[in-house]
Amino acid sequence: MQLDCFDHAILVALQRDATVSNAALAEVVHLSASQISRRRAALEAAQVILGYTARLNAGQLGFGLRAITRVNLRSHGHGGDRDFARFVAGRPEICAAFSVSGDADYVLDIRVRDLDAYAAFIHDWLLPQTQVGQVRSELVLKTLKDRGGLPLE
């Protein structure tokens, strides 16, 4: 899909506030609300916009611990990778997961209530996975930046 300056402006505005109405977007982008609606639908259909979410305050909701966890698999085969991907998809504690280059096979962003919950996740769920060979964790002490989105501006 070829994006023009209007599409770009819509995307910038939606990244700032995904709840903005088409009428409000129309004022910002300088198009009619019906044109905004058509363009927004086209961006969704083309999967440029994948969905809409609310950013929640993890600490206010009792999720006080965030860990960046590096995982190395025992061996690299299609079945092991597929099984690990299935495990990751099924665990709500894992907020994001990445297959990476470097000294780890995967990097997981894990959110739990406290250190006891993290230890339980590691010992009861992650380490028992037969394909997992090594786990290394960094606990997040302070978040400097966590805005999500893309640098469109």
Image (tube, helix red, strand yellow):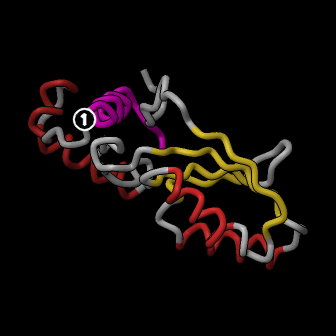
Residue placed most toward the observer, 32 or 144 = 144
- In the rendering, at what x and y percent does residue 26 appear? 15, 32
Image: magenta residue range: 1-16
Which residue is depicted at the point 71% across and 77% down? 83
- In the rendering, at what x and y percent does residue 4 appear? 40, 31
Quadrant of the image occupied by residue 16: top left
Query: Relative to 24, is 6 on the left or the right?
Result: right
Query: Relative to 112, is 24 on the left or the right?
Result: left
Query: Relative to 74, is 43 on the left or the right?
Result: left
In the displayed structure, 16 sits above or below 92; it is above
Residue 13 within the segment the image draws in magenta = yes
- In the rendering, at what x and y percent does residue 85 appear? 66, 69
Q: Quadrant of the C terminus?
A: top left
Quadrant of the image occupied by residue 9: top left
Residue 67 within the segment the image draws in magenta = no
Helix, strand, or loop for circle 1?
Answer: loop
Which residue is depicted at the point 66% across and 67% down? 123
Which residue is depicted at the point 33% across and 49% down? 62
> Which residue does the numbered mark 1 point to in the structure image?
17
Q: Amino acid at mark 1?
A: Asp
Residue placed most toward the observer, 29 or 72 = 72
Which residue is depicted at the point 44% across and 48% down? 48
- In the rendering, at what x and y percent does residue 43 appear? 36, 48
